[in-house]
Amino acid sequence: MAAPPCPQRDPAWVGRVSWLLFGGVLLWPALVATEFRPWVLLDADSLGPTSRFLGSFFPPALGGEFLALVARETWRTVAIATAGIALGLLIALPLTLLSTRVLSVSALSGRMATGPALLRHALRGALVVLRSIPELVWALVFVRVVGLGPTSGVLAIALTYGGMLGKVYSEILESADTHASATLLRHGSSRLQAFFYGVLPGNAAELTSYTVYRWECAIRSSVVLGFVGAGGLGQQMDSSMKMFNGGEVATMLLVFMGLVALADHASAWLRRALG
Amino acid sequence: MDSRPAANAPYRLPPRQFDARCKACWLGAGVVLLVTASFWTLDLQWGAFVSPEAARAMGRFLGEFFPPDLSAPFLRKVGAATLETLAMSALGTLLAAIGGLALALPASRTHAGDRAAARGPTRLLLNALRSIPELVWAALLLISAGLGPFAGTLALALHTTGVLGRLFAEAIENAAPGPAFALRTQGVPSGRVLLYATLPQIVPQLMSYTLCRWENNIRAAAVLGVVGAGGLGQLLAFHMGLFHMGKTATIIGAMLVLVALVDAMSFAARRWLTR
């Protein structure tokens, strides 16, 4: 039996070429809209300042006074993230307790009553709105109200992360086993008792580990918030960049990368310890 | 000797609630200490929120957001900025997928005999790209790419290259080794082994990682502009800087709609794909 002749040409080439052309047609407006002109990077006007700026990265600034400043600002970055998460928890915990279906008494027997269902949906909506406004926008608004400084960063992180934590907390509680809490509620315990004795023991590790993960994310975003004037390492980095002080920028980038790696390891270790 | 257990089980005290080995207590104490120190060292200006005149100022400020500017020319401008945001995110993700794949190949050990000399350095590069946030990249790139969406696109591309490169490298290393081994024992060169054995297995995974990052990047691109890197964020920073509060409200509304649309579409797509 002879093998069928091997096709010399790709049998699917019509499809491939037309998809490629279709992709190109879609790509063209995107290239125009983003003013995609890579040759700008090689322009003499941009190459000169870029190479001067990059050249000034070495050596990184290592003066004692500057290092003390960087250490202070790094601590402020961590502190903004921690304080923001702490305030975010104050927002998230009550909203979680009020919006989770697990603690609904009327849902024990069939459908949830209309009033509580509406309340839960409204609170869910509030959490989604809090979460979907980026923290950078909150920070921009608060910088206008309270002025430059860490207050606006703390508030921005508190609001956005409060929404995120609240939404995820109630999802975690609802996806867990509800047998214990339902039994407690059926036997007449109060909702808080059902929460503390029926829901929390089974979910505490997962809730804590998600919170720790979010703390790590908050450290990253508190650096970014500094760029709009919310204090910390980001604000210093922004001002050094505006002064084209490459050495200081290099030091702070290194410190920032170290901080992120440290937070990464700390959070991984904590989450492993929580099991 | 009689090895039967004693008639009365030896009376054992329950473990003490607080002793030096109670991990949870140390952890809790550490968290309390960290939070207290954070609030202590940040000079937070709560006065700006709690005093009655501050509340009035805040109310006035929020009142200025209404009515949002809904005139046709401004809406057209916001629409154009939204499209620019979408184009930035799409192009940035596409560039990152290409760059990520290019870096994932040296960053992965494809078979046991592979020396993979470039694995360590490439992974270090990917980590560096990943640990600097998009916004910091954008601020750095403004010097060489100038104000506008091009800098934002490149910033998204650089950060996402780090993220995707690492994920792609994991995918390549975790692909089932059988087909590649079969080809290699026949003497097929490694480039073709990749094209015909490894890539066909992992393409669906690579696509889903890329789409997931695209969704993320749309959200990031919306705010990236506040340092001057194009899209809705640039418009927001501009009008907020000039205290055009009605226009600011429209732009924030457009951001919310964009994020909500992306959320809804990804939810629908996930449901459709996993049905």
Image (spheres, coloured by chain):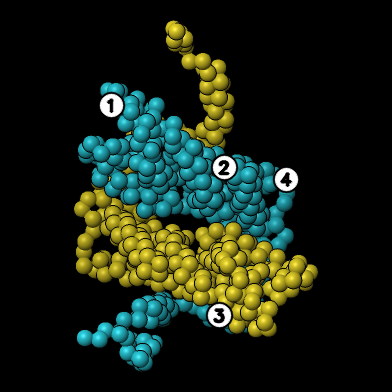
Both on one chain, marks 2 and 4? yes
Dot 2 or dot 1: first in sequence order is 2
Question: Does A208 sit left or right of A160 as displayed?
Answer: left
Dot 4 or dot 1: first in sequence order is 4
Q: Residue B255: percent from the left, percent from the top?
A: 61, 52
Both on one chain, marks 3 and 1? no
Which mark is nearer the camera, 2 or 1?
1
Tint applied to chain A in the drawing: yellow
**Residue named by callout 1:** B185
Do callouts 3 and 2 mark residues in contact (Cβ within 8 Å)?
A: no
Indicate the chain on which mark 2 is placed.
B
Q: Which chain is cyan?
A: B
Q: Residue furthest front?
A: B1
The numbered mark at residue B13 is none
The residue under label 2 is which amino acid type? Leu
Instruction: Estimate how packed mark 1 is, as few (under 14), some (14 to 19) or many (20 or more) residues with alpha carbons within 10 Å.
Output: few
**Residue named by callout 3:** A197
The residue under label 3 is which amino acid type? Tyr
Of B116 and A136, nearer the camera is: B116
Instruction: Estimate how packed mark 3 is, as few (under 14), some (14 to 19) or many (20 or more) residues with alpha carbons within 10 Å.
Output: some
The residue under label 4 is which amino acid type? Ala
Both on one chain, marks 3 and 2? no
Which mark is nearer the camera, 4 or 1?
1
